[in-house]
Amino acid sequence: ESRMTTKYLGRQVVFFAETDSTNQKAKLFGEERRENGTLVVAEHQTLGKGRRGRKWESPEGENIYMSLLLYPQIQTSSAPQLTLVMAMAVAKGIREVYGTDVGIKWPNDVVLSGKKICGILTEMSLEAEFISYVVIGVGLNVAQQEFPQEIRDKATSLLLETKKSVSRSELIAEVIRHFEDLYERFLIKENLSDLREEYNALLLNRGKEVRISTPKEEYTATGLGINDTGELLVRLEDGSERAIYAGEVSVRGL
Ligand code: ATP
């Protein structure tokens, strides 16, 4: 059943009752050059992945695990910005369906009541120095009631916070519809300059203290907003400003 009202994203939906990870499947489809915008959806993932080899808890039930396959003709250095585009699409889709405001914790976490409800993992494959395909994975906690001990204080679901039950296919359709609109606007300049204000309006780190840790250093700063390429601008204690790149950085504090 498809409720898609998009032009080309999610016209082709491949559903798995169980899979290792939807990103893994979408990457295989990318190797096969399946249709642009193919969406992989699973009811359960046995090896759900987060950034930097982290695990994404993916129990069977009422959550959303999905990955979108794209063939953007953009610089490889622009591809990580798609994670921010998807975070916006998820936030807007949720607002549409639940009538609830959710925020974004830079770069890629969608947060409700200070807890994480969604993780996004973007992966790309290169051929020579060009992008062969990009896969954007979304794990969204829709109706999960309980979380494992390790993440109990930082994870929640839409049902737990809003007490509302919605149709997952409608939520998927809304997220993909918003993504299509934002993605097309992103592609015009291949950066976030036209989306920056909208992203910053959803950004929870704005004016807040953030704890930044990189392999080299750890420090505290104030979040200001993203720049045109999706880096987080922060003000340091000495008043100077700095742009931090998502790659190897972990940001704490909301
Ligand atoms: P962090 O939010 O800790 O900085 P990250 O952004 O680097 O993590 P992600 O890829 O977004 O990493 O998510 C992986 C992390 O999210 C895990 O290490 C775990 O702490 C947490 N997590 C795992 N599964 C879930 C889930 N279903 N819901 C919410 N949080 C989860």
Image (spheres, grey):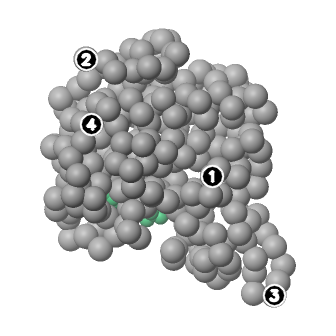
Answer above or below: position of 57 versus 236: above
Label 4 and label 1: CA atoms lie apart by: 24 Å
Give the residue pinned by disc 2. 1
Of all residues, the one furthest to the bottom in this rendering is 238
- Mark 1 or 3: in front is 1
Mark toward the start of the polypeptide (4 vs 3): 4
Which numbered disc flags the more N-terminal residue, 3 or 2? Answer: 2
- Crowding around mark 2 (Cα neighbors within 10 Å: few <14, some 14 to 19, many 20+) is few
Three-letter code for the amino acid on which mark 2 is drawn: Glu
Q: Is residue 188 visible?
A: yes
Judged from the image, the secondary structure of the residue bearing numbered disc 1 is helix
Instruction: Determine crowd level at label 4: few under 14, some 14-19, many 20+ residues with C-alpha closer than 10 A.
Output: some
Alpha carbon distance from label 1 to label 3 = 27 Å
Q: Residues within 10 Å of mark 3 (few under 14, many from 20)?
A: few
Kindly give the residue lying farthest to the right in the view shown: 240
The disc, 2 or 1, on the residue closer to the chain's N-terminal end is 2
The image position of residue 139, as x and y in percent, is: 35, 45
x 29%, y 74%: residue? 153
**Which of the marked residues, 2 or 4, is nearer the chain's N terminus?**
2
Choose between 254 and 238: the one closer to the eye. 254
Amino acid tagged 3: Asp
* Residue to which mark 3 is pinned: 238
Q: Can you tell which mark lies on residue 199?
A: 1
* Labels 1 and 3: the sequence-earlier one: 1
SS at circle 4:
helix
